[in-house]
Image: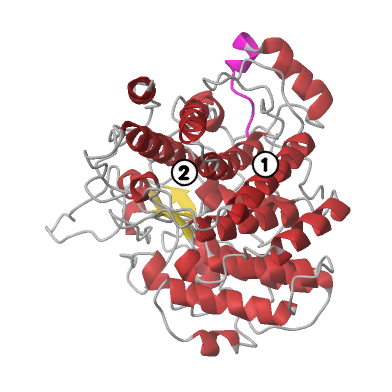
Amino acid sequence: MKHTISKIFAGALLLGTVSCTANYLDINSNPYQPGDLTADDYALGSAMNSLASGVISSDVNTAQFTEALMGGPLAGYFAPANAGWENTVSNYNPTDDWTNVLLKSAKVIPVIYTNLGIIETVSEQTGSPVPMAIANIIKVAAMHRITDTYGPIPYSKIGADGSINTPYDSVEEIYMAFFDELDASIATLNENSEYKLVATADYVYSGDIKKWIRYANSLKLRLAIRIANVKPDVAREKAEEAVNDPGGLITSNADNAAWHYFGSVQNPLYVAVNYNRVSTHDDGTACTSTGDTHAAADIICYMNGYDDPRREMYFTKSEWEGYDYVGLRHGIEIPEHGAIGHKFSGPNIKANDALQWMNAAEVAFLRAEGVAVYGFNMGGTAKDFYEQGVRLSFEQWGVTGADTYLAQETAVPEIYDDPSGSNDYNAQLSTLSVKWVDGSKDEMQERILIQKWIANYPLGNEAWADYRRTGYPHLIPATAAGNMSNGEVDSNRGARRMRYPHDEYVSNAQNVQNAVSTLLGGPDLMSTDLWWAKKN
Protein backbone atom coordinates (compact mmCIF):
# COMPACT_ATOMS: atom_id res chain seq x y z
CA MET A 1 0.00 0.00 0.00
CA LYS A 2 2.84 2.40 0.76
CA HIS A 3 4.21 1.88 -2.71
CA THR A 4 0.73 2.48 -4.09
CA ILE A 5 0.64 5.90 -2.45
CA SER A 6 3.83 6.92 -4.17
CA LYS A 7 2.49 5.67 -7.48
CA ILE A 8 -0.69 7.63 -7.01
CA PHE A 9 1.33 10.77 -6.51
CA ALA A 10 3.44 10.08 -9.54
CA GLY A 11 0.25 9.89 -11.53
CA ALA A 12 -0.85 13.24 -10.13
CA LEU A 13 2.23 14.83 -11.65
CA LEU A 14 1.05 13.83 -15.11
CA LEU A 15 -1.93 16.17 -14.95
CA GLY A 16 -2.28 18.50 -17.90
CA THR A 17 -1.02 22.06 -18.14
CA VAL A 18 -2.33 25.45 -19.19
CA SER A 19 -0.22 27.13 -21.86
CA CYS A 20 -1.48 30.11 -23.82
CA THR A 21 0.84 33.10 -23.68
CA ALA A 22 4.28 31.53 -23.50
CA ASN A 23 6.28 28.42 -22.79
CA TYR A 24 6.47 27.29 -19.19
CA LEU A 25 8.89 25.48 -16.93
CA ASP A 26 7.82 22.13 -15.61
CA ILE A 27 8.57 22.55 -11.93
CA ASN A 28 6.01 20.29 -10.32
CA SER A 29 8.66 17.75 -9.46
CA ASN A 30 10.45 18.15 -6.16
CA PRO A 31 14.18 18.70 -6.65
CA TYR A 32 14.79 18.78 -2.91
CA GLN A 33 13.32 15.44 -1.99
CA PRO A 34 16.04 13.15 -0.55
CA GLY A 35 16.11 9.50 -1.47
CA ASP A 36 16.46 7.93 1.99
CA LEU A 37 12.94 8.44 3.30
CA THR A 38 10.39 5.81 4.21
CA ALA A 39 7.61 5.22 1.70
CA ASP A 40 5.21 7.10 3.95
CA ASP A 41 7.58 10.05 4.34
CA TYR A 42 8.24 10.18 0.64
CA ALA A 43 4.55 10.05 -0.26
CA LEU A 44 3.75 12.69 2.35
CA GLY A 45 6.56 15.00 1.26
CA SER A 46 5.63 14.76 -2.40
CA ALA A 47 1.92 15.25 -1.76
CA MET A 48 2.37 18.16 0.68
CA ASN A 49 4.65 20.04 -1.69
CA SER A 50 2.39 19.43 -4.65
CA LEU A 51 -0.56 20.59 -2.54
CA ALA A 52 1.30 23.78 -1.62
CA SER A 53 1.68 24.54 -5.32
CA GLY A 54 -2.10 24.93 -5.47
CA VAL A 55 -2.02 28.19 -3.49
CA ILE A 56 0.10 30.21 -5.92
CA SER A 57 1.01 27.79 -8.65
CA SER A 58 4.60 26.75 -9.29
CA ASP A 59 3.63 26.37 -12.94
CA VAL A 60 4.75 29.46 -14.83
CA ASN A 61 1.79 29.81 -17.16
CA THR A 62 -0.71 29.26 -14.38
CA ALA A 63 0.96 31.85 -12.15
CA GLN A 64 1.26 34.23 -15.09
CA PHE A 65 -2.49 34.17 -15.67
CA THR A 66 -3.55 34.33 -12.01
CA GLU A 67 -0.94 36.73 -10.60
CA ALA A 68 0.74 38.75 -13.37
CA LEU A 69 -2.25 39.15 -15.70
CA MET A 70 -5.27 39.08 -13.36
CA GLY A 71 -4.72 39.78 -9.65
CA GLY A 72 -1.71 42.05 -10.12
CA PRO A 73 -3.28 44.49 -12.63
CA LEU A 74 -6.69 44.54 -10.93
CA ALA A 75 -4.92 45.40 -7.66
CA GLY A 76 -2.87 48.23 -9.16
CA TYR A 77 0.44 46.35 -8.78
CA PHE A 78 1.20 45.27 -12.37
CA ALA A 79 0.39 46.38 -15.90
CA PRO A 80 0.54 44.15 -18.99
CA ALA A 81 3.04 45.39 -21.55
CA ASN A 82 2.57 43.14 -24.56
CA ALA A 83 0.91 45.15 -27.34
CA GLY A 84 0.13 41.91 -29.15
CA TRP A 85 -2.53 41.02 -26.58
CA GLU A 86 -5.93 42.15 -27.84
CA ASN A 87 -7.99 40.68 -25.01
CA THR A 88 -6.78 41.21 -21.43
CA VAL A 89 -8.20 41.33 -17.93
CA SER A 90 -6.90 44.92 -17.68
CA ASN A 91 -8.96 45.89 -20.74
CA TYR A 92 -12.01 44.06 -19.35
CA ASN A 93 -12.36 41.96 -22.50
CA PRO A 94 -10.45 38.78 -21.64
CA THR A 95 -10.98 35.58 -23.53
CA ASP A 96 -11.95 32.46 -21.67
CA ASP A 97 -8.44 31.03 -21.65
CA TRP A 98 -7.33 34.06 -19.63
CA THR A 99 -10.02 33.83 -16.98
CA ASN A 100 -10.75 30.12 -16.54
CA VAL A 101 -7.43 29.14 -14.98
CA LEU A 102 -8.15 29.22 -11.25
CA LEU A 103 -11.32 27.16 -11.67
CA LYS A 104 -10.49 24.84 -14.56
CA SER A 105 -6.71 24.42 -14.75
CA ALA A 106 -5.39 20.95 -14.02
CA LYS A 107 -2.70 22.71 -11.96
CA VAL A 108 -5.05 23.99 -9.28
CA ILE A 109 -8.18 22.18 -8.01
CA PRO A 110 -7.22 18.68 -9.26
CA VAL A 111 -3.76 19.06 -7.70
CA ILE A 112 -5.29 20.22 -4.42
CA TYR A 113 -7.82 17.43 -4.08
CA THR A 114 -5.76 14.55 -5.45
CA ASN A 115 -3.03 15.31 -2.94
CA LEU A 116 -5.47 15.84 -0.10
CA GLY A 117 -6.51 12.23 -0.63
CA ILE A 118 -2.92 11.00 -0.50
CA ILE A 119 -2.23 12.96 2.68
CA GLU A 120 -5.38 11.60 4.30
CA THR A 121 -4.26 8.05 3.53
CA VAL A 122 -0.79 8.67 4.97
CA SER A 123 -2.29 10.30 8.08
CA GLU A 124 -4.47 7.25 8.61
CA GLN A 125 -1.58 4.84 8.09
CA THR A 126 0.73 6.68 10.46
CA GLY A 127 -1.93 7.44 13.06
CA SER A 128 -1.14 11.16 13.04
CA PRO A 129 -3.84 13.79 12.37
CA VAL A 130 -1.24 16.56 11.97
CA PRO A 131 -0.49 16.27 8.22
CA MET A 132 -4.18 16.34 7.39
CA ALA A 133 -4.75 19.35 9.64
CA ILE A 134 -2.00 21.24 7.81
CA ALA A 135 -3.31 20.06 4.45
CA ASN A 136 -6.74 21.51 5.24
CA ILE A 137 -5.17 24.86 6.12
CA ILE A 138 -3.43 24.87 2.74
CA LYS A 139 -6.70 23.91 1.05
CA VAL A 140 -8.47 26.91 2.59
CA ALA A 141 -5.57 29.19 1.60
CA ALA A 142 -5.92 28.00 -2.00
CA MET A 143 -9.69 27.73 -2.30
CA HIS A 144 -10.53 31.14 -0.86
CA ARG A 145 -8.60 32.67 -3.75
CA ILE A 146 -10.88 30.81 -6.15
CA THR A 147 -14.20 31.75 -4.57
CA ASP A 148 -12.92 35.32 -4.17
CA THR A 149 -12.38 35.37 -7.95
CA TYR A 150 -15.66 33.91 -9.22
CA GLY A 151 -18.14 33.95 -6.33
CA PRO A 152 -20.13 30.71 -5.87
CA ILE A 153 -18.08 27.66 -6.88
CA PRO A 154 -18.29 23.89 -6.37
CA TYR A 155 -16.85 23.18 -2.93
CA SER A 156 -18.66 20.85 -0.56
CA LYS A 157 -19.21 18.21 -3.23
CA ILE A 158 -15.92 18.36 -5.15
CA GLY A 159 -14.74 14.86 -6.00
CA ALA A 160 -11.65 13.24 -4.58
CA ASP A 161 -9.91 13.73 -7.93
CA GLY A 162 -10.83 17.41 -8.03
CA SER A 163 -13.78 16.96 -10.34
CA ILE A 164 -16.01 20.05 -10.22
CA ASN A 165 -18.94 18.67 -12.22
CA THR A 166 -21.00 19.10 -9.07
CA PRO A 167 -23.49 21.57 -7.56
CA TYR A 168 -22.15 24.97 -6.49
CA ASP A 169 -22.09 26.42 -2.98
CA SER A 170 -22.80 30.06 -2.15
CA VAL A 171 -19.89 32.26 -1.04
CA GLU A 172 -21.47 32.49 2.40
CA GLU A 173 -21.68 28.70 2.71
CA ILE A 174 -18.07 28.34 1.54
CA TYR A 175 -16.79 30.89 4.05
CA MET A 176 -18.63 29.19 6.90
CA ALA A 177 -17.03 25.90 5.83
CA PHE A 178 -13.62 27.61 5.77
CA PHE A 179 -14.07 28.67 9.38
CA ASP A 180 -15.12 25.17 10.43
CA GLU A 181 -12.12 23.63 8.67
CA LEU A 182 -9.68 26.14 10.12
CA ASP A 183 -11.13 25.72 13.61
CA ALA A 184 -10.73 21.95 13.40
CA SER A 185 -7.16 22.24 12.13
CA ILE A 186 -6.20 24.77 14.79
CA ALA A 187 -7.62 22.54 17.53
CA THR A 188 -5.72 19.52 16.21
CA LEU A 189 -2.44 21.40 15.92
CA ASN A 190 -2.80 22.99 19.37
CA GLU A 191 -3.18 19.47 20.78
CA ASN A 192 -0.08 18.32 18.88
CA SER A 193 2.07 21.46 18.92
CA GLU A 194 5.28 19.55 19.70
CA TYR A 195 4.86 17.23 16.72
CA LYS A 196 7.61 17.62 14.14
CA LEU A 197 6.56 17.20 10.54
CA VAL A 198 9.33 15.84 8.30
CA ALA A 199 11.06 18.96 6.98
CA THR A 200 11.04 17.79 3.35
CA ALA A 201 7.23 17.77 3.49
CA ASP A 202 7.12 21.43 4.40
CA TYR A 203 8.84 24.19 2.44
CA VAL A 204 6.72 26.76 4.25
CA TYR A 205 7.68 26.21 7.90
CA SER A 206 10.12 23.29 7.82
CA GLY A 207 7.82 21.19 9.95
CA ASP A 208 7.28 23.76 12.75
CA ILE A 209 3.72 23.12 13.93
CA LYS A 210 3.56 26.23 16.12
CA LYS A 211 4.15 28.40 13.07
CA TRP A 212 1.37 26.60 11.22
CA ILE A 213 -0.97 27.41 14.11
CA ARG A 214 -0.06 31.09 13.89
CA TYR A 215 -0.65 31.05 10.15
CA ALA A 216 -4.02 29.31 10.49
CA ASN A 217 -5.19 31.87 13.06
CA SER A 218 -3.98 34.70 10.83
CA LEU A 219 -5.76 33.26 7.80
CA LYS A 220 -8.89 32.96 9.92
CA LEU A 221 -8.54 36.65 10.82
CA ARG A 222 -8.15 37.59 7.13
CA LEU A 223 -11.37 35.75 6.24
CA ALA A 224 -13.23 37.22 9.22
CA ILE A 225 -12.41 40.78 8.19
CA ARG A 226 -13.40 39.91 4.61
CA ILE A 227 -17.01 39.28 5.68
CA ALA A 228 -17.27 41.99 8.34
CA ASN A 229 -19.63 44.15 6.25
CA VAL A 230 -22.11 41.36 5.50
CA LYS A 231 -21.93 39.07 8.53
CA PRO A 232 -20.62 41.28 11.36
CA ASP A 233 -21.49 38.99 14.27
CA VAL A 234 -19.70 36.00 12.78
CA ALA A 235 -16.80 38.21 11.72
CA ARG A 236 -16.41 39.53 15.26
CA GLU A 237 -16.60 36.05 16.76
CA LYS A 238 -14.03 34.55 14.40
CA ALA A 239 -11.68 37.53 14.45
CA GLU A 240 -11.59 37.64 18.24
CA GLU A 241 -11.17 33.86 18.43
CA ALA A 242 -8.16 34.15 16.13
CA VAL A 243 -6.59 36.89 18.22
CA ASN A 244 -7.23 35.12 21.53
CA ASP A 245 -6.22 31.60 20.50
CA PRO A 246 -3.33 30.38 22.67
CA GLY A 247 -1.39 29.45 19.54
CA GLY A 248 -1.18 33.11 18.57
CA LEU A 249 -0.98 35.00 15.27
CA ILE A 250 1.81 35.90 12.88
CA THR A 251 3.43 38.87 14.64
CA SER A 252 7.01 38.44 13.43
CA ASN A 253 8.47 38.25 9.94
CA ALA A 254 10.12 35.03 11.04
CA ASP A 255 6.64 33.50 10.94
CA ASN A 256 5.60 34.83 7.51
CA ALA A 257 3.87 32.21 5.39
CA ALA A 258 5.90 31.76 2.21
CA TRP A 259 6.70 28.78 0.00
CA HIS A 260 10.50 28.47 -0.07
CA TYR A 261 10.60 25.98 -2.88
CA PHE A 262 12.77 27.70 -5.43
CA GLY A 263 16.42 26.81 -5.78
CA SER A 264 17.30 24.67 -8.74
CA VAL A 265 14.00 25.80 -10.26
CA GLN A 266 12.92 29.42 -10.64
CA ASN A 267 10.15 31.44 -9.07
CA PRO A 268 7.34 31.32 -11.68
CA LEU A 269 6.59 35.05 -11.40
CA TYR A 270 10.22 35.87 -12.14
CA VAL A 271 9.96 33.87 -15.35
CA ALA A 272 6.52 35.20 -16.28
CA VAL A 273 7.21 38.92 -15.90
CA ASN A 274 10.38 38.58 -17.98
CA TYR A 275 8.82 36.90 -21.00
CA ASN A 276 9.66 38.87 -24.18
CA ARG A 277 12.05 41.14 -22.32
CA VAL A 278 14.01 43.68 -24.30
CA SER A 279 17.54 42.80 -23.21
CA THR A 280 19.54 45.47 -25.04
CA HIS A 281 18.93 48.85 -26.62
CA ASP A 282 19.80 49.72 -30.19
CA ASP A 283 23.17 51.00 -29.01
CA GLY A 284 23.98 47.70 -27.30
CA THR A 285 23.53 48.90 -23.71
CA ALA A 286 21.62 46.65 -21.33
CA CYS A 287 17.92 47.16 -20.67
CA THR A 288 17.19 46.94 -16.95
CA SER A 289 13.42 46.48 -16.96
CA THR A 290 11.11 43.50 -17.49
CA GLY A 291 9.09 42.03 -20.33
CA ASP A 292 5.38 41.25 -20.60
CA THR A 293 4.60 42.69 -17.16
CA HIS A 294 5.62 46.07 -15.72
CA ALA A 295 4.96 47.96 -12.53
CA ALA A 296 1.55 49.63 -12.42
CA ALA A 297 1.30 53.39 -12.29
CA ASP A 298 -1.01 53.15 -9.26
CA ILE A 299 1.38 51.76 -6.68
CA ILE A 300 4.33 53.79 -7.89
CA CYS A 301 2.29 57.02 -7.66
CA TYR A 302 1.54 56.27 -4.02
CA MET A 303 5.09 55.19 -3.20
CA ASN A 304 6.67 58.13 -5.05
CA GLY A 305 4.40 60.57 -3.25
CA TYR A 306 5.32 59.07 0.12
CA ASP A 307 9.01 58.82 -0.84
CA ASP A 308 8.78 55.16 0.14
CA PRO A 309 12.20 53.49 0.50
CA ARG A 310 10.70 50.10 -0.41
CA ARG A 311 10.51 51.16 -4.07
CA GLU A 312 13.99 49.92 -4.87
CA MET A 313 13.14 46.53 -3.38
CA TYR A 314 9.84 46.25 -5.23
CA PHE A 315 10.73 47.67 -8.64
CA THR A 316 13.47 48.29 -11.15
CA LYS A 317 14.26 51.89 -12.10
CA SER A 318 12.72 53.20 -15.29
CA GLU A 319 14.58 54.05 -18.46
CA TRP A 320 12.72 57.31 -18.96
CA GLU A 321 15.00 60.31 -18.57
CA GLY A 322 14.04 62.31 -15.49
CA TYR A 323 12.02 59.49 -13.88
CA ASP A 324 13.53 57.14 -11.32
CA TYR A 325 10.40 55.06 -10.83
CA VAL A 326 7.41 55.34 -13.11
CA GLY A 327 4.69 52.78 -13.72
CA LEU A 328 2.70 51.87 -16.80
CA ARG A 329 -1.00 52.64 -16.58
CA HIS A 330 -3.15 49.53 -16.95
CA GLY A 331 -6.50 49.58 -18.70
CA ILE A 332 -5.06 51.40 -21.71
CA GLU A 333 -4.27 50.64 -25.31
CA ILE A 334 -0.98 48.84 -24.64
CA PRO A 335 1.95 50.64 -26.29
CA GLU A 336 4.54 48.87 -28.42
CA HIS A 337 6.98 47.29 -26.03
CA GLY A 338 10.23 47.64 -27.94
CA ALA A 339 9.81 51.36 -28.46
CA ILE A 340 7.90 52.50 -25.37
CA GLY A 341 6.70 49.83 -22.97
CA HIS A 342 10.08 48.48 -21.89
CA LYS A 343 11.10 51.88 -20.49
CA PHE A 344 8.72 51.67 -17.52
CA SER A 345 9.75 50.28 -14.14
CA GLY A 346 9.37 46.53 -13.75
CA PRO A 347 8.75 44.12 -10.84
CA ASN A 348 12.03 43.41 -9.06
CA ILE A 349 11.37 39.71 -8.55
CA LYS A 350 14.36 37.38 -8.15
CA ALA A 351 14.67 33.88 -9.55
CA ASN A 352 14.90 32.21 -6.13
CA ASP A 353 12.43 34.43 -4.22
CA ALA A 354 9.89 32.56 -2.12
CA LEU A 355 6.21 32.85 -3.03
CA GLN A 356 4.59 34.93 -0.30
CA TRP A 357 1.26 33.76 1.13
CA MET A 358 0.83 36.02 4.15
CA ASN A 359 3.06 38.37 6.11
CA ALA A 360 3.15 39.83 9.61
CA ALA A 361 2.43 43.33 8.31
CA GLU A 362 -0.90 42.20 6.85
CA VAL A 363 -1.91 40.69 10.19
CA ALA A 364 -1.12 43.96 11.99
CA PHE A 365 -3.20 45.93 9.47
CA LEU A 366 -6.08 43.45 9.82
CA ARG A 367 -6.06 44.07 13.55
CA ALA A 368 -5.89 47.83 13.00
CA GLU A 369 -8.94 47.70 10.72
CA GLY A 370 -10.78 45.40 13.12
CA VAL A 371 -10.44 47.97 15.89
CA ALA A 372 -10.82 51.21 13.94
CA VAL A 373 -13.64 50.29 11.58
CA TYR A 374 -15.57 47.44 13.21
CA GLY A 375 -14.94 47.90 16.92
CA PHE A 376 -13.57 44.38 17.41
CA ASN A 377 -11.35 43.57 20.38
CA MET A 378 -8.02 42.97 18.69
CA GLY A 379 -5.83 43.27 21.77
CA GLY A 380 -4.55 46.81 21.20
CA THR A 381 -5.18 50.15 19.52
CA ALA A 382 -5.63 50.86 15.83
CA LYS A 383 -2.75 53.34 15.87
CA ASP A 384 -0.34 50.84 17.41
CA PHE A 385 -1.28 48.08 14.98
CA TYR A 386 -1.09 50.48 12.02
CA GLU A 387 2.39 51.65 12.91
CA GLN A 388 3.44 48.09 13.69
CA GLY A 389 2.30 47.06 10.20
CA VAL A 390 4.47 49.69 8.54
CA ARG A 391 7.50 48.81 10.69
CA LEU A 392 7.09 45.09 10.01
CA SER A 393 6.92 45.71 6.26
CA PHE A 394 10.05 47.84 6.32
CA GLU A 395 11.80 45.09 8.25
CA GLN A 396 10.57 42.41 5.86
CA TRP A 397 12.04 44.23 2.89
CA GLY A 398 15.27 45.18 4.64
CA VAL A 399 14.89 48.96 4.48
CA THR A 400 15.27 51.63 7.15
CA GLY A 401 13.47 54.88 7.81
CA ALA A 402 10.14 53.69 9.20
CA ASP A 403 10.05 56.47 11.82
CA THR A 404 10.54 59.17 9.19
CA TYR A 405 7.95 57.55 6.94
CA LEU A 406 5.36 57.30 9.72
CA ALA A 407 5.87 60.96 10.68
CA GLN A 408 4.80 62.31 7.27
CA GLU A 409 1.85 64.67 7.64
CA THR A 410 1.61 66.38 4.24
CA ALA A 411 2.96 63.95 1.63
CA VAL A 412 0.29 62.55 -0.69
CA PRO A 413 0.38 60.28 -3.76
CA GLU A 414 1.79 61.97 -6.84
CA ILE A 415 -0.24 62.79 -9.93
CA TYR A 416 0.40 60.33 -12.74
CA ASP A 417 2.52 61.86 -15.47
CA ASP A 418 2.95 59.39 -18.33
CA PRO A 419 6.39 59.95 -19.86
CA SER A 420 5.08 58.74 -23.22
CA GLY A 421 2.53 61.58 -23.18
CA SER A 422 -0.43 59.30 -23.88
CA ASN A 423 -2.08 58.23 -20.64
CA ASP A 424 -1.75 60.91 -17.95
CA TYR A 425 -4.17 60.86 -15.03
CA ASN A 426 -4.58 64.28 -13.47
CA ALA A 427 -6.80 63.49 -10.46
CA GLN A 428 -5.47 63.18 -6.91
CA LEU A 429 -5.65 59.52 -5.84
CA SER A 430 -5.79 60.31 -2.11
CA THR A 431 -5.51 63.32 0.16
CA LEU A 432 -4.23 61.21 3.05
CA SER A 433 -0.65 61.20 4.22
CA VAL A 434 1.03 58.46 6.24
CA LYS A 435 0.90 59.73 9.84
CA TRP A 436 -1.87 58.14 11.87
CA VAL A 437 -4.89 60.32 12.69
CA ASP A 438 -7.88 59.25 14.78
CA GLY A 439 -10.45 60.42 12.25
CA SER A 440 -13.69 59.11 10.81
CA LYS A 441 -14.09 55.39 10.16
CA ASP A 442 -13.83 55.98 6.41
CA GLU A 443 -10.64 57.99 6.77
CA MET A 444 -9.04 55.46 9.11
CA GLN A 445 -10.02 52.59 6.84
CA GLU A 446 -8.56 54.31 3.78
CA ARG A 447 -5.27 55.05 5.58
CA ILE A 448 -5.00 51.48 6.85
CA LEU A 449 -5.87 49.97 3.47
CA ILE A 450 -3.34 52.13 1.60
CA GLN A 451 -0.50 50.97 3.79
CA LYS A 452 -1.75 47.38 3.88
CA TRP A 453 -1.89 47.44 0.06
CA ILE A 454 1.68 48.68 -0.22
CA ALA A 455 2.87 46.12 2.35
CA ASN A 456 1.06 43.21 0.68
CA TYR A 457 2.82 43.64 -2.67
CA PRO A 458 2.93 41.46 -4.79
CA LEU A 459 -0.14 39.56 -3.49
CA GLY A 460 -2.43 40.97 -6.17
CA ASN A 461 -5.40 38.67 -5.66
CA GLU A 462 -5.55 39.55 -1.97
CA ALA A 463 -5.23 43.28 -2.71
CA TRP A 464 -7.94 43.04 -5.39
CA ALA A 465 -10.26 41.43 -2.83
CA ASP A 466 -9.56 44.26 -0.38
CA TYR A 467 -10.27 46.83 -3.08
CA ARG A 468 -13.61 45.25 -3.91
CA ARG A 469 -14.48 44.94 -0.23
CA THR A 470 -13.63 48.53 0.75
CA GLY A 471 -13.05 50.68 -2.35
CA TYR A 472 -9.50 51.40 -1.11
CA PRO A 473 -6.99 52.37 -2.18
CA HIS A 474 -8.32 54.60 -4.95
CA LEU A 475 -6.88 53.32 -8.23
CA ILE A 476 -6.38 54.88 -11.65
CA PRO A 477 -9.36 53.95 -13.85
CA ALA A 478 -9.12 52.51 -17.32
CA THR A 479 -9.07 54.99 -20.16
CA ALA A 480 -12.06 55.34 -22.44
CA ALA A 481 -10.12 53.59 -25.20
CA GLY A 482 -8.68 51.01 -22.82
CA ASN A 483 -12.01 49.87 -21.37
CA MET A 484 -13.04 47.39 -24.05
CA SER A 485 -15.92 45.80 -22.13
CA ASN A 486 -18.62 47.42 -24.30
CA GLY A 487 -20.11 49.07 -21.25
CA GLU A 488 -20.11 46.01 -19.01
CA VAL A 489 -17.46 47.21 -16.55
CA ASP A 490 -17.43 50.63 -14.91
CA SER A 491 -13.90 52.01 -15.30
CA ASN A 492 -14.00 53.63 -11.86
CA ARG A 493 -15.03 50.41 -10.07
CA GLY A 494 -13.06 47.97 -12.19
CA ALA A 495 -13.73 44.27 -12.61
CA ARG A 496 -15.65 42.80 -9.67
CA ARG A 497 -15.18 39.11 -10.53
CA MET A 498 -14.30 36.75 -13.37
CA ARG A 499 -16.97 35.09 -15.49
CA TYR A 500 -17.50 31.35 -15.24
CA PRO A 501 -15.59 29.41 -17.91
CA HIS A 502 -17.49 28.56 -21.08
CA ASP A 503 -16.81 24.89 -20.47
CA GLU A 504 -18.91 25.00 -17.30
CA TYR A 505 -21.95 25.73 -19.47
CA VAL A 506 -21.21 22.54 -21.40
CA SER A 507 -19.86 20.07 -18.86
CA ASN A 508 -21.73 21.33 -15.77
CA ALA A 509 -24.55 23.32 -17.33
CA GLN A 510 -27.41 22.77 -14.87
CA ASN A 511 -25.24 23.47 -11.83
CA VAL A 512 -23.62 26.64 -13.16
CA GLN A 513 -26.95 27.97 -14.41
CA ASN A 514 -28.47 27.35 -10.99
CA ALA A 515 -25.51 29.12 -9.37
CA VAL A 516 -26.04 32.19 -11.54
CA SER A 517 -29.80 32.30 -11.03
CA THR A 518 -29.90 31.61 -7.28
CA LEU A 519 -26.48 32.13 -5.70
CA LEU A 520 -24.46 34.79 -7.52
CA GLY A 521 -26.72 37.79 -6.96
CA GLY A 522 -26.52 39.01 -10.53
CA PRO A 523 -25.67 37.99 -14.09
CA ASP A 524 -22.50 36.11 -14.97
CA LEU A 525 -20.57 39.28 -15.78
CA MET A 526 -17.34 40.88 -14.63
CA SER A 527 -19.42 43.72 -13.18
CA THR A 528 -21.41 41.61 -10.70
CA ASP A 529 -20.41 42.12 -7.07
CA LEU A 530 -19.60 39.20 -4.81
CA TRP A 531 -21.48 38.58 -1.55
CA TRP A 532 -18.90 40.32 0.66
CA ALA A 533 -18.04 43.19 -1.73
CA LYS A 534 -18.89 46.87 -1.31
CA LYS A 535 -21.90 47.49 -3.54
CA ASN A 536 -21.47 51.19 -4.34
- Residue at the image point whose x is 38% and y is 58% from the top: 347
- Give x and y (percent) for residue 308: 48, 77
Which is more toward the observer, 196 or 53?
196
Residue 163 in magenta? Answer: no
- Residue type beneath disc 2: Ile
Which badge, 2 or 1, is on the more N-terminal residue? 2
Residue at x 32%, y 35% (from the top left corner): 42
Amino acid, disc 1: Glu
* Side of 526 where 195 appears, left or right: left
Q: Residue furthest right?
A: 233
- The residue to which callout 1 is attached is 181
Give the image's coloring scheme.
secondary structure
Rendered image quadrant of residue 530 = top right
Residue bounds of the magenta highlight: 495-507
* CA separation in Å, label 2 and label 1: 20 Å
Q: Is residue 3 above or below residue 149?
A: above
Image quadrant in which the N terminus is located? top left
Residue drawn at x 73%, y 78% is: 380
10 Å crowding of disc 2: few (<14), some (14-19), many (20+): many
In this rendering, position of residue 418 left or right of residue 166: left
The question of residue 496 being in magenta is answered with: yes
Image location of residue 47, percent across then percent down: 41, 34
Foreground of the two, 201 or 165? 201
Please give the residue where the numbered disc 2 appears in the rendered image: 56
Of residues 424 and 176, the one nearer the viewer is 176
Residue at the spot 62% in from the left edge and 48% down from the top edge: 188
